[in-house]
Image (cartoon, rainbow, N blue to C red):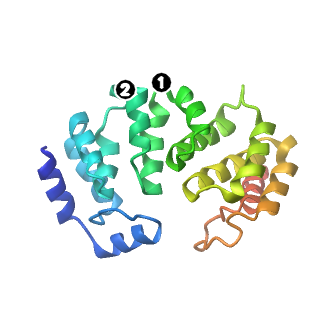
Amino acid sequence: MKLADALKKLKSLGHASVRAHNTKFGATGEQFGVKMGDIRALAKTIKTDHALALALWKTGNVDAQFLAVLVMVPKNLSAEELDALVRTTSFAHVADWFSSYVLKEHPEREELRVRWMASDDPWAARAGWGLTSTRVAKDPKGLDLKALLDRIEAEMGTAPEPTQWTMNAVLANIGIHHPKLRKRALAIGEKLGVYRDYPCSKGCTSPFAPIWIAEMVRRQEA
């Protein structure tokens, strides 16, 4: 599929309600407002097309970037290309798809994680903390969890929103998966108050770390 054809198809699938939803959650760039299911269906017809994926990403269009994530080939990207892509998103939902479908599959993700954790770029830092959150929960060997809590306590309260979200996920995962550090994680969450008043739909768990930790621990022990 050519870039022009892909964009034309995405435009035809747009919905005002989806555009409004995306805008509410931080999308500021161009978008058509395509439902996630329709983007996935279109990706299935394309299968993989790495060149098209890169072209879609470069448009900066939210829906095009969602589609790009699903049709690109992670192993074809160098570490430097990944770094450039991470820094050229502007919507958290796209960034999280990119992390889940591309970054977590890349052999150089650990090298990039360490680099991004020290970055001043909020989107690179978001990616670094996001990868760290996964490691805290699934593969914590080699991580200095106490040092991570020190950084979170010192930095999360004033961190840019893109970074703050995944820093908070690290805090929650330390509290959930590492009982010896749970008391401190809860105390940091209460002290900083990040996401204390975050609006949640019925049945959803608040991202406020003390509530999140308590609920996940309750489920583990049930």
Picture residue at 85% right of the left edge, 56% below the top? 187
Is disc 1 surrounded by few (<14), some (14 to 19) or many (20+) residues within 10 Å? few
Q: Are marks 1 and 2 in contact (CB under 8 Å)?
A: yes
Give 154 or 41, whichever is nearer the viewer. 154
At a point 39% along the width and 65% down the height, the residue shown is 28
> As shown in the figure, which amino acid type bears the numbered disc 2?
Lys
Q: Tag on residue 133?
A: none
The kind of residue tagged 1 is: Pro
Quadrant of the snapshot with the N terminus: top left
Residue 186 versus residue 126: which sits nearer the camera? 126
Q: Nearer the viewer, residue 208 or 42?
A: 208
Where's the C terminus, which quadrant? bottom right
Question: Residue at (78%, 48%) from the top-left corner?
Answer: 175
Q: Is residue 220 visible?
A: no
- Give left or right: position of 106 versus 158: left
Along the horizontal axis of the image, is 83 left or right of 159? Answer: left
Label 1 sits on residue: 107
What residue does disc 2 label? 75
